[in-house]
Image: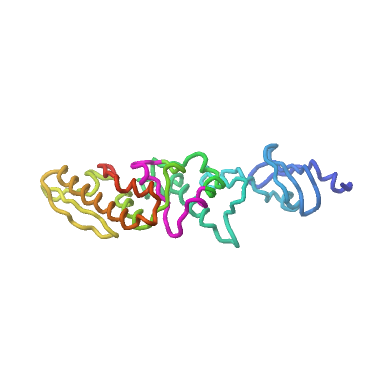
Amino acid sequence: MNNQSSEKVGEMWISKEGYILKIIDYISYKNCTIEIDNKYVLKNKTYQNIKNGEVKNPYHFSVYNIGYIGIGKYKTSICNKPTLAYKCWNSMLQRCYDKKFIDKNLWYSKCEVDYNWHNFQNFAEWFEKNYVKGYELDKDIINNGNKIYSPTNCCFVPKEINNLFANCKKQKRTFPIGVSKLRNKYLCQLSLNGINHKLGIFDTVEEAFNEYKKQKENQIKKLAIYFKNSINKKVYNSLMSYSIKVTN
């Protein structure tokens, strides 16, 4: 190590995120090893980026003040385009921790993400093993009514299946799902592919909901059978035994 190199070892700078960047090894101007806040070691950083405070802490809560990128092989972007894993992870965190989004989508007001998935590297590893091209992330098919995104609760399903469970989640309801007041009677409706289908008019709320429940569960089973060969067995079994609750 030459004199210039040895002089730079021990230098400390403040990052734009507010962390102390300490140089612990200086191989060259373009190859420095630093320690962040005496906790995390990062290699192959340029002296200029360190001096300018542009080195990012991989454990900084940079996504909705709760998610962080972590250290590992999974990248958030390739050629300046977000990876599929990152887009899925970011959207999941948004649904749970972005107040503006939640205010417009009240169904997510009590949802949260498992602590281990706050680290993008952990989520990306699960994503790589489970993702099916074109499928969407779901948290409450395997565990009916679940509010926590986690490896044990989540799965990837075709858009058609996910849409079937997404109906009416944005609004607060006075009556059970699928039921609305019509003068002194109760109207039962089922939404399929964005189109409302009237199932009948009933004297009581209970009768209207029971009809909705029967028809909805039939639709779920039909889709489960249709996609049986392209969804995993656990998801298929959950769909075939899925029971619609008043609050679904």
Q: Is residue 243 left or right of residue 113?
A: left
Can you see residue 238? yes
Q: Quadrant of residue 77?
A: bottom right
**What percent of the width, then of the height, locates residue 147?**
39, 41
Could you tell me what secondary structure mostly forms the magenta stretch? loop
Q: Is residue 162 above or below residue 110?
A: below
Q: Residue at x 50, y 39 (%)?
A: 115
Find residue 66 and report its horizontal and vertical position in percent.
Answer: 52, 42
Question: Which quadrant holds the C terminus?
Answer: top left
Q: Residue at x 55, y 47 (%)?
A: 120
Tell me if 64 is positioned left or right of 160 in this view.
Answer: right
Q: Is residue 106 visible?
A: no
How many labels, in total? 0
Write the residue at 46% across / 49% down. 92
Q: What segment carries the magenta color? A: 126-147
Tell me what residue is drawn at x 24 percent, y 47 percent.
Answer: 177
Q: Is residue 137 magenta?
A: yes
Foreground of the two, 245 or 127: 127
Residue toward you, 54 or 112: 112
